[in-house]
Image (cartoon, grey):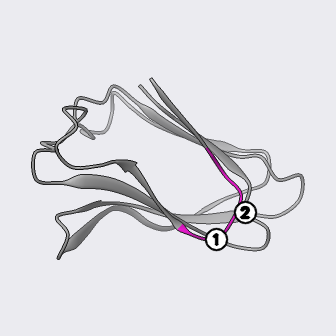
Amino acid sequence: MQLFRITSATTTTLIDTNLDQGAIRYITIANCHASNALTIRLFYSDGTNDTSIVEDLVIPAGTTLLLGDDHDISFDNSFLSLKLQTTGTSPDCNVIIK
């Protein structure tokens, strides 16, 4: 299991290439801010090209997004990484990958 706390508008590498961690059961992304919405982009990257899983998804304050059994989110991280881009006013989110 991996845990992340992201408190700025940034791009975070959740799973880097060549770490033998591409088997994912689920990802939760919780907007922990009391009043501001969070906009995210979750994507795979090969270092040159990016492909979005979700693009410009708005998560309301106090809400959690769950991607799991109904989404095929596992990937071959021998050549791909998984990244999360956060935008919005004072982003504050928690990410769990299992």
Q: Residue at x 71, y 58 (%)?
A: 7
In which quadrant will I find the C terminus?
A: top left
Of the pair 80 and 37, the residue shown nearer to us: 80
Q: Residue at x 10, y 53 (%)?
A: 79
Amino acid found under the numbered disc labelled 2: Pro
- Dividing the picture into quadrants, the one containing residue 87 is bottom right
- Distance of label 2 from label 1 (alpha carbons): 6 Å
Q: Secondary structure at mark 2?
A: loop
| Magenta region, main secondary structure | loop
**CB atoms of marks 2 and 1 within 8 Å:** yes
| 2 or 1: tag closer to the N-terminus | 1
Magenta-drawn segment: 5-10
Picture layout, residue 38 above or below residue 67: below
In which quadrant will I find the N terminus?
A: top left
Disc 1 designates what residue? 9
Q: Alpha-carbon neighbours of circle 1 within 10 Å: few (<14), some, or many (≥20)? A: some
- Dividing the picture into quadrants, the one containing residue 36 is bottom right
Q: Residue at x 72, y 63 (%)?
A: 91
Q: Residue at x 18, y 75 (%)?
A: 49
Residue 27, percent across and down? 45, 36
Q: Which residue of the protein is positioned furthest toward the right in this rendering?
A: 34
Residue 2 sits inside the magenta stretch? no
Disc 2 designates what residue? 91
Residue 22, percent across and down? 22, 36
Residue 26, percent across and down? 40, 30
Residue 95 vs residue 98: left or right?
right
Amino acid found under the numbered disc labelled 1: Ala
Q: Secondary structure at mark 1?
A: loop
Mark drawn on residue 25: none
